[in-house]
Image (tube, rainbow, N blue to C red):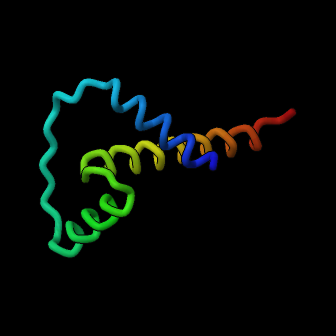
Amino acid sequence: MLFEYRVASIALGLALMRKSATLNLRVSVEFKKRLMAEAAKENRSVTNYLEATLLSLWEKKTELTTAVARKRMPR
């Protein structure tokens, strides 16, 4: 539930962001098929799926880094 909320929040934020940069990737046929299938499962475009997935991953990494840093700090 929390994950769905965060993804929805991220998606809302993305909807408000202007998209003006182009990114071209060369990937294997297998990767492209998998990417398209995963995006379709979530009823997203490939671009939206990549953005939401990467932003979620980056947010989790930031939270993990912050949690580790807090544990290392003396109280």
Task: Name above or below for residue 52 compared with residue 16.
Answer: below
Q: Residue at x 13, y 38 (%)?
A: 22
Q: Position of residue 40 (x, y in %)?
A: 30, 61
Q: Residue at x 25, y 24 (%)?
A: 18
Q: Is residue 43 toward the left or the right of residue 33 in the image?
A: right
Q: Position of residue 32 (x, y in %)?
A: 20, 66
Task: Name above or below for residue 14 compared with residue 24.
Answer: above
Q: Residue at x 28, y 70 (%)?
A: 34
Quadrant the C terminus occupies: top right
Please tell me which residue lies in front, 55 or 48. 48
Q: Position of residue 54 (x, y in %)?
A: 39, 48
Q: Position of residue 41 (x, y in %)?
A: 37, 63
In the image, farthest residue toward the front: 43
Q: Is residue 73 toward the left or the right of residue 38 in the image?
A: right
Please tell me which residue lies in front, 70 or 10. 10
Q: Residue at x 13, y 60 (%)?
A: 26
